[in-house]
Amino acid sequence: MPKRIAIIQGHPDPRGGHLGQALAQAYADGAQRAGNEIRIIEVAALQFSFLRTKEEWETGAPPDGIQDAQRTIGWADHLVFFYPLWLGSMPALLKAFLEHVFRPQFAIAKPAGGKVWKKLFTGKSARIVITMGMPALVYRWYFRAHSLKSLERSILAFSGVRPIQSSLFGLIEARSDATREKWLATMCSLGARAR
């Protein structure tokens, strides 16, 4: 059964030409060929400021581009996030985007008088794709994949998204063209299966 897929391209460089962007395009191509519907959010193309207060996060009105992104994410059955690892984490622009998007009353809701946040994204699934200069195994085992786990647990699972899968691509500057082609084929295959 075809799925509605939102691809969130989290590379902050609007010029393009990065491996993560090629991987996202390969995923989209595979998904579309398999009959899935695709919408792409280019975080670098959006205009928004950083949130600075709890009140702004809880009750402030999201900027227009963020509202459009929320409509796309709300529409989707499956979310796919692409970002490069910068200083051991996601780029600040992507984190700011997620803070805007995953607000109360959109991704989560606190029931009146309740103590537990209600998860509003139950039924959605996700994949997180991270590119990095270090070996992926080192990131996963030595650094314990902390930014990946933060996105999985503190944002996606907290709002009800599951299952959440991941793909890590390491030593990207040192890889051969043949390896990159294999990576693109892998993403195309995952897109075709909407995984």
Image: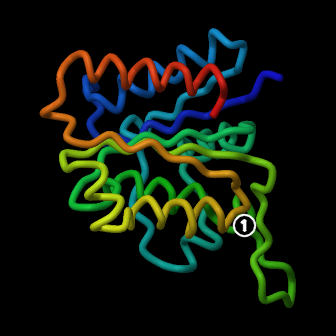
| Residue visible at 45% across and 67% down in the picture | 51
x and y, in percent, of residue 52 in the image? 42, 74
Q: Is residue 121 above or below residue 40?
A: below
Quarter of the rendering containing residue 180: top left
Q: Is residue 6 above or below residue 136?
A: above
Q: Secondary structure at mark 1?
A: strand
Q: Alpha-carbon neighbours of circle 1 within 10 Å: few (<14), some, or many (≥20)? A: some
Quarter of the rendering containing residue 153: bottom right
x and y, in percent, of residue 1 in the image? 83, 23
x and y, in percent, of residue 116 in the image? 77, 83
| Residue visible at 39% across and 35% down in the picture | 45
| Residue visible at 36% across and 67% down in the picture | 144
Q: Is residue 1 left or right of residue 38?
A: right
Between 172 and 68, the residue placed more toward the observer is 172
Quarter of the rendering containing residue 61: bottom right
Which residue is tagged 1? Answer: 108
